[in-house]
Image (cartoon, rainbow, N blue to C red):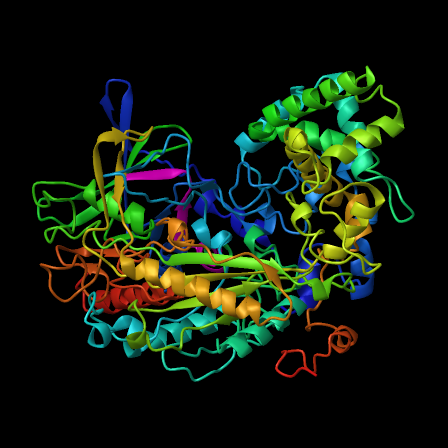
Amino acid sequence: MNRRESLKALGIGTLSAGVLLEACKPNNNKLAEDTKDTGVTADNAGRQPFEVERDKKLNADKFFTDHEMATITLLGDIIIPKDARSGSASDAKVPAFIEFIVKDMPDHQTPMRGGLRWLDLQCLNRYGKTFVDAASSQQIEMVTEIAYPKKAKPEMAQGVSFFNRMRDLTASGFYTSKIGIEDLGYAGNAPGKWDGVPAEVLKQYNIKDAWGDKWD
Amino acid sequence: MENSEWLSSPAITHSPHTALYSLTMNDIQIKKSSTVYDAIIVGSGAGGGMAGYVLAHAGLKVLMLEAGPFFDPAKDSMQLKWPYESARRGAGTTRYFGDFDAAYGGWEIDGEPYTTKDNTEFHWFRSRMLGGRTNHWGRISLRMGPDDFKGHHIDGLTDDWPISYEDVKPFYDKVDRLIGVYGTVENLPNEPDGIFLPPPKPRLNELYIKKGAAKAGVKVIAGRGSVLTEALPGNKDRGACFFCGQCGRSCKVYGDFSSSSCLVIPAIKTGNLKVIPNAMVREVLTDADGLATGVSYISKDDMQEYQVKGGMVILGASAGESARLLLNSKSSRHPNGLANSSGVVGRYLHDSTGSSAGGWLPELMDRKRYNEDGVGSVHIYGPWVYDNKKLNFPRGYHIEFGGGLHMPGYGFSGGIQNMNGVVPGKDGKMKEAGGFGADLKNDYRRFYGTGFGMAGRGTAIARYDNYCEIDPNVVDKFGIPVLRFHYKWSDYEINQAKHMQDTFQEIMHNMGGAIYGPPAGKETSYGLEAPGMIIHEVGTVRMGDDPKKSALNKYCQAHDCKNLFVVDAAPFVQQGDKNATWTILALSMRTAEYILSQRKKTNV
């Protein structure tokens, strides 16, 4: 069976490669985040019954309070805001992903809950308000204290640890979403023919041949 | 492909657990089938699958028992799913290698424990599904070389196989043609060439690795993997690869090798092979003469006990499970367990060594985007072509390389605060590490696709004192006594891991501005993975010419029981640095053909 027949077997039909590429781009697919916040689709083929059950249970549970979710949403959008190329963390449903993942990976729970409380106490002492109720300039001032590990004051160390985790979870949630994948320009997960690094890219890096045996 | 056709064939739609009469023991019954198959195969991975394929095509009536569910990659693969189609974005919470990975099971399986002894460590990965671990493996398909089969004359260590490379070569050739493998002819002394499909070209990051390795004097060649980079000549059932790089999810068009798609499902189509899924085999049954008569198993579907009969029993349950089965099959004729008068069953367990490193290339920041998924096996690797006489470890390792514009998943760009403070921003000025906001968002884009990694996979020496045995105190949820492992690395493996780390540093140093950490140090045994972590465990039912020192003859036939064969990695005397699967396939085919030749002579 050749490649064309492979694609036919996949149910993709006899479309040209260009059309296939287009068809497999994330914006043309039915998106989990359009249907359900946590990204679970109805398609459970190949999944083990215990996995389906487990996800169902995790989705039914609620871990973060509304106040905590509001704080996570705000922090997420401070970490990854909307810009000219793409939307914000909350546009990509990152808060819902974080709610799911702390239930999926309980090791996140105490550092996240405690970190959020640490942040609120800092803000209450500084500004007399919790993080979400503080002025946006105060929010940025607070985040700036914990967002730069090397220059952060020693007494901010716990906040730095929390923010590192929050930043990582936000990046995980955002760049695995449809919005984030498009933003990155990831061009794969689409049937094609790999024939090595494109010629113009080889040229850009002064590589003479696709096997990398000769360089300028 | 008409995959529905064989599914509705009588071979598997009839209730598999047919009982003709029952023996009542309180409320538990042992249901005995009167059907006598020509052969019963335990396990459906590379070894069991190949034996089933050959025997079923030769017309034998074969029953295959698999401890997990039926799995057809055409229907059950997670191929081409996007990260957001997983609630955990592909993270490995319930599947170690990620939510889309095609392994049911893992290092721990609920209700199926194993134990360790004397504070030693061993990790045992099991995939309970049709095709076993071949559904998710790395498809790296290397032949063992002449010195791997017979290396004793070089270093005076370990034992030689009773067979040589020349004995196995015809079967490697046949496996290459039957299943397909890509690679390049290199004429290296201990890295035998095969019959190759064209290899995939390197990704950009891998070109930098090649450059660094060349400067460091480390040989790097095209990868060797069982992926159909072109249509396999003469095969209409399998599709050619379309380069999604997701072999680990198993392939819906059968474009890579899984035992399920390439061996068992075609064998079912002959009408001669019947698979009973969810059948956990308890023991091999023997008669008064000590010959195998069949096996007993528990069905995970109805939790009933069954016995099935066969003219021969072929174990392909994995090195660990086959040893466990033999040790649990005690009788008056076989008081130490079946095929174990030598006492070697469970002994000489060995897994490949592994140690790894990685970093990223600032030169690749802001790189142009294109589809760089490639294949799901290695594009380049470094074979061992060096002289161990000058080194403080006896046998070599190969290096597997990777890096490129991969699909994002959980953990994407984690720890960016360790990256964005060490290189200048777009304005040429250094920035404070960490941060947030539009500037950070831009950094994520800039760093995407700059990473690379390398992992050594080396020969561990087979040792009598590294073993698995039956734990006298522990049973699994089916009441089957479990394995207890005892395994320690020696200085040979630790020194080899140090050499890997030193080599990785040299390669990365020569890649041109790569950023990477220091080598793993002595406190971690140089990053040496714990035994079992590389999932290349072999050697527990070794072959040999001397029945006092081996369990099987050179055809993987038990010395003590002539109608019992072992076709997984258990018969390995001594692994090479090569991943075991291609050798399992070749040896299983060789054993199956031996069985056919013996049947002609009516010896089996």
- Judged from this view, the residue extending furthest toward the right is A84
Asked if B463 appears above or below A3 in the picture, the reply is above
The reply to whether residue B19 is visible in this rendering is yes
Quarter of the image for the C terminus of chain B: give it: bottom left
Which is nearer the eye, A167 or A197?
A167
* Number of numbered labels in the structure image: 0
Which is nearer the eye, B234 or B532?
B532
Residue at screen point 67% across, 37% down: A164
Which is nearer the eye, B168 or B52?
B168
The answer to which quarter of the image holds residue B89 is: top right
Position of residue B547 measured from the top left corner of the image (x, y, whole percent): 11, 60
Asked if B199 appears above or below B547 in the picture, the reply is below
Position of residue B437 measured from the top left corner of the image (x, y, whole percent): 82, 41
Position of residue B325 measured from the top left corner of the image (x, y, whole percent): 25, 44
Specify whether A119 is left or right of B324: right
Specify whether B521 is left or right of B234: left
The answer to which quarter of the image holds residue B84 is: top right
- The stretch of residues the image draws in magenta is B262-282
Specify whether B562 is left or right of B257: left
Specify whether B424 is left or right of B525: right
Judge whether residue A48 is colored magenta: no
Residue at screen point 56% across, 67% down: B508
Position of residue B396 measured from the top left corner of the image (x, y, whole percent): 36, 69
Asked if B68 appears above or below B135 in the picture, the reply is above
Quarter of the image for the N terminus of chain B: give it: bottom right
The reply to whether residue B57 is visible in this rendering is no
Asked if B597 appears above or below B572 in the picture, the reply is below
